Amino acid sequence: MNIHEYQAKELLKSYGVRIQEGVVTDSPEGALKAAKKLSAETGTSWYVIKAQIHAGGRGKGKVKETGSNGVVLAKKLEDVPEKAKNILGGTLVTIQTGEEGKKVNKILVAEDVYYPGDSEPKEYYLSILLDRAKGCNVIMASTEGGMDIEEVAEKTPEKIIKEWVDPKVGLQGFQARKVAFKLGLEGNAFKEMVKFISALYNAYIGSDASQFEINPVLKTSDDKILAVDAKVNLDDNALYRHKDLAELRDLAEEDPLEVEAGKSDLNYVKLDGNVGCMVNGAGLAMATMDMIKLSGGEPANFLDVGGGANATTVEAGFRIILQDPNVKAILINVFGGIVRCDRIANGVVEAYKSIGDIPVPIIVRLQGTNAEEGAKIIDESGLKVSSAITLKEAAEKVRAAIS
């Protein structure tokens, strides 16, 4: 589960991670109040206004309606409302949102942390995630903060620092010091970075996160280390242990069809193709999408109805798939292991009758327990549904349906 920057920063702060202070708001008037509050609490006189959406590249992104960037600087208090107005309610298009962009419902008004001092501010990159190949968490760091880490890895891979942490013993002090040393820090900045890394790792473990990305981590002109931005992804499977974190979910940032599917306990991901697919099992779903591509089509979605599929779940799957106007055919590919094929066939027939006339061809491929009985139920239903037993037969029927 993704959360907003302002939520991520509050989470980090609760674990002792130093952050760029800010106040979230949803109106230009609220932005002015937030700026005044920041001035009183931090002494800042410049204000950074940041769009809060679940996407990166906000600083380079553009609001369609006004042309404003997603992250702007107000150098005067009186400029804050107008700059906030140019972002709020608009559609922000970034490299990660695609051309459709995302509506900005909230902004974060943050303090200016790039103030002058004894040394120049310096940006770093820091992330923590699971290295599945090694079965360890890995801390990734770089002196090239503020840049896309993919670009750094491609052009200057030697600037990527990696430190693996054994989950049995956790992060050791020498490891945090090693990362700080490799970043070229010394003196108070070195000590601050060591504390920052240790607190960040504790936050990562304590919140059952799947990824933390802090870009940039800033060394201020007076050698403080703090998070200027924060991207946090929480492990959905662990949210039952964190009711407070589960409440941070923002449904407005998620695909409406994926939200609807979740209510019916369906695993659904929308894609850009023309063949809707409904499958029981993630591995079979991947194979089905390959089969659709080999047949000349493109998968319109990933939809796993699970092992306990019945008429209710099949009907919910139909309704979700049919909301995609690009779908020209629907392929149901079921292996009858946990659930019998004849039960799935009856579920398809009942769901079809409940929905009414479905405007696209439906191909049902059944294999496994009672596959022949299931195919007979489909063929004798009198509905616009055709059955298939083999993958080749299903692929041929998909090709015919979309041609």
Image: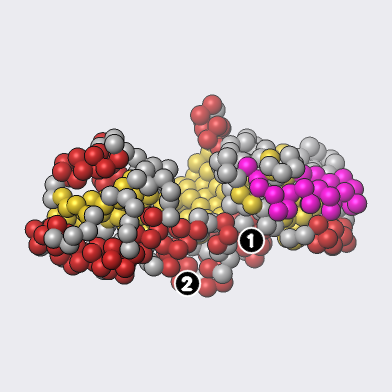
Q: Residue at x 91, y 51 (%)?
A: 78
Q: Which residues are magenta?
A: 72-93
Residue 39 appearing in the image: yes
On the image, the x and y values in percent for residue 288 come to 26, 46
For label 2, the SS is helix
Front: mark 2 or 1: 1
Which sits in the foreground, 230 or 179?
A: 230
Q: Is residue 304 left or right of residue 385?
A: right
On the image, the x and y values in percent for residue 237 come to 42, 64
Residue 185 appearing in the image: no
Quick check: is 350 in the magenta stretch? Answer: no
Q: Residues within 10 Å of mark 2 (few under 14, many from 20)?
A: few
Which sits in the foreground, 212 or 400?
A: 400
On the image, the x and y values in percent for residue 16 come to 66, 62
Identify the residue under disc 2. 241
On screen, 294 above or below 21? above
